[in-house]
Image (cartoon, helix red, strand yellow):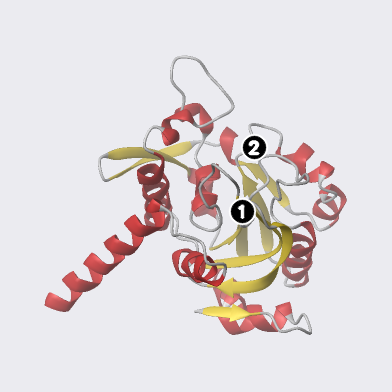
Amino acid sequence: MILSVNSDGNLVGTLKRIGIETALERSQSVLIKINMARPPEPGHPRTDVRLLAGIIEYFASKNVECALAEGANGFLIENLERAGLKKLVQKKQVKVVDLDLEEYDGVVVEGEEHYLPKCLRDYGTRIGIPAFSKRSGMTFSNNVKLFVGAVPRRMYQFSEETTWRLRVHVDLHRSVANIYRAVMTYAPFEFFINGGKAIIEGQGEFELPVLVGDDGLELDRYLLKQFNLEEPEYITRLVELDSMRKDERGYR
């Protein structure tokens, strides 16, 4: 399901229609995976600050435990401060979880072992709020690729440690698809909120309309079609796998 926030900006009503309020009644805790490994800068948008601030305010009004999560190599609080969100996070008592510093479990998908922070399971409702980008020489990034920033970078190094998750780039599309599959098996994310600052190389930065969905892959494919962008290989892999599973269910 994909819902568009009306032009009147009724985000709360849209969240209710997608089922977030029902989920919160069940869990009373929410973890939000954001894209904030580095602060936003021109040409490099991160999770939209205004959109995220509105979501924080919304969950604060519901009196539920709320956490922001991202793998930022120990700099997540600093990144939030530079983005102008630190005061709001402190005021609303939002927990800040740098996933690069967390304990993890190993999850094997298609012969690849990936490492997922155990704390993902500490929250009953999990939401992704990525940043939409397609830059020259880089693969499309939004909901599915958001979770590359969830795996601890110390587990994706070779002999010399860097700030990159180098092992992911050995077979990038396979690894991106498998990390997404691992997350959705280990600690599934139920909701995805897209919108705000976005970029497509050659077209520049623009404001992406706010969309709320319950399937990250579906929402990525919808946006790729809307902007006439080619589906990256990792999306194709996930679509083919999903089709195979549906076929198998049909034979039972």
Q: Going 41% across and 40% down the picture, which residue do you hit?
A: 172
Residues at marks 1 and 2, CA–CA distance in whole angstroms: 19 Å
Residue 252 visible to an observer of this rendering? no
Q: Is residue 127 left or right of residue 239?
A: right
Q: Is residue 94 above or below residue 245?
A: above
Nearer mark to the viewer, of 1 and 2: 1
According to the image, label 2 marks what residue? 72
Q: Is residue 219 above or below residue 101?
A: below
Q: Which residue reaches farthest front?
A: 202
Local SS, label 1: strand
Q: Quadrant of residue 71?
A: top right
- State the image coordinates of residue 233 (x, y, percent, origin top left): 38, 52
Label 1: few (<14), some (14–19) or many (≥20) C-alpha neighbours in 10 Å: many
Instruction: Give the mark nearer the N terminus: 1 vs 2.
Output: 2
Residue 52 visible to an observer of this rendering? yes
Count of picture labels = 2
The amino acid on which the numbered mark 2 sits, given as a three-letter code, is Ala
Residue closest to the eye, 25 or 135:
135
- State the image coordinates of residue 90 (x, y, percent, origin top left): 83, 50
Q: Going 25% across and 40% down the picture, which residue do you hit?
A: 111
The amino acid on which the numbered mark 1 sits, given as a three-letter code, is Ser
Q: Is residue 71 left or right of residue 184?
A: right
Give the number of the disc on residue 133.
1
Q: Quadrant of the C terminus?
A: bottom left
Q: Is residue 11 left or right of residue 159?
A: right
Label 2: few (<14), some (14–19) or many (≥20) C-alpha neighbours in 10 Å: many
Q: Which residue reaches farthest top?
A: 159
Q: Going 61% across and 61% down the picture, which residue do you hit?
A: 30
- State the image coordinates of residue 164 (x, y, percent, origin top left): 55, 30
Give the number of the disc on residue 237.
none
